[in-house]
Amino acid sequence: MNTRNINSYDQGVVVKKNIGSYQIRTGSRILACALSSRLHKQLIYTASNPNARHASVSKVKTLDNVDPLAVGDLVRFVNAQDGSGLITEVLPRRNRLARRDPNPGKHKFEQIIVANVDYIVPVFAAANPTPKWGLLDRYLSSAESLGLAALVVITKLDLARDADGALEDGLQADLEEYRRIGYPIHLTSSVTGEGLEALRQTLKGSLSAFVGKSGVGKTALLNALEPGLGLRVGAVGSGPIGKGKHTTSAAEMFTTAFGADIVDTPGMREFGLVDMDGGDLALFFPEMRALVGKCKFRLDCSHDEEPGCAIRQAVMAGQISPLRYQSYLRLIEEV
């Protein structure tokens, strides 16, 4: 995300956060900022509509278990002129990468990991370990539910080519299925350098959130994109995201020499569908979306065992991948 056009010193972007403190980038400067106490409070009104003519504040509730800021947020702040500041306003978000609060309790809060994201970047190895496409489907459907563009990156291509340089047939077929659906895929190797420059050009000028399991070569990829980047990112990625009452994120934004902002999401064990709210999960599978509402039972169809299901018919006709359909059914069970 390009924030270099922010000229005013009272506006900037959150690049790092810890409990109670934030680092804000404004122009070429980094300021340590605290959060105004009013951003931790929720006003409770006498009327259901706070804009109603006779509405008045009846109670002020302190939100002690929700951090109102995320890395990537654009904020306004009071500059103390000593290298510090006080954040007074969070500007409207374009989008957010979020997850459900995993802590038990009656009241669930959404945990925002990164705000104003241009790409969510699922990273998978071509081999060692074998890619788990069901996990990729989880990432992609979650991105769809949040309105985020996805960019799939495959690493370790050097381990998946034969003596003639061709990709293994199974891997090639799997990747072509995702391309057919419409997802862009970058094939890379940190050993041979394959695909790295094309990936740099795609990421340039954007804020990208990388997701992926350990062992897929994410650190090696980041180091190959820019020497030392993987080590810098790994230094803040040792702790899990979202444990305990006061939830915080270990995410930090890094700006590369080639003009990209990158955030890793370490420890993000749950990547759930935060925007379901009773909707049809098939809407978050692009190849199924056009068929929603065309089943015999219209919007009441769960696309599982109902007769006359348009999505099941498309699977049997070879128009929808059986593996993607199985991923859909697994996610339905969770939701």
Image: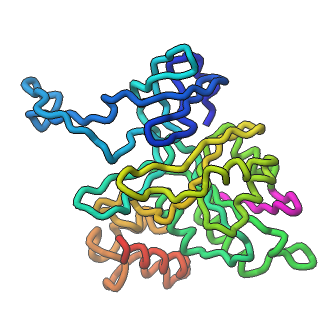
Please check the rendered image and state whether residue 35 is part of the magenta-colored stretch, yes or no: no
Relative side of 176 to 258, left or right: left
Where residue 82 appears, as percent x and y from the top left, is 56, 16
Q: Residue at x 64, y 67 (%)?
A: 214
Q: Residue at x 17, y 28 (%)?
A: 51
Instruction: Estimate the x, y position of residue 92 in percent, counting from the top left.
Output: 41, 33
In the image, 138 versus 82, the foreground residue is: 82
Residue 303 visible in the shown view: yes
Q: Quadrant of residue 48?
A: top left
Residue 163 position within the rendered picture, expressed as x and y whole percent measured from the top left: 92, 79
Say if residue 319 shows up in the picture. Answer: no
Q: Position of residue 14 (x, y in %)?
A: 53, 35
Q: Is residue 36 left or right of residue 135?
A: left
Quarter assignment of residue 46: top left
Foreground: 153 or 312? Answer: 153
Task: Return the residue nearer the eye: 8 or 64.
Answer: 64
Which image quarter: residue 152? bottom right
Q: Residue at x 82, y 49 (%)?
A: 197
Task: Give the left or right position of residue 331, taking residue 53 as reference.
Answer: right
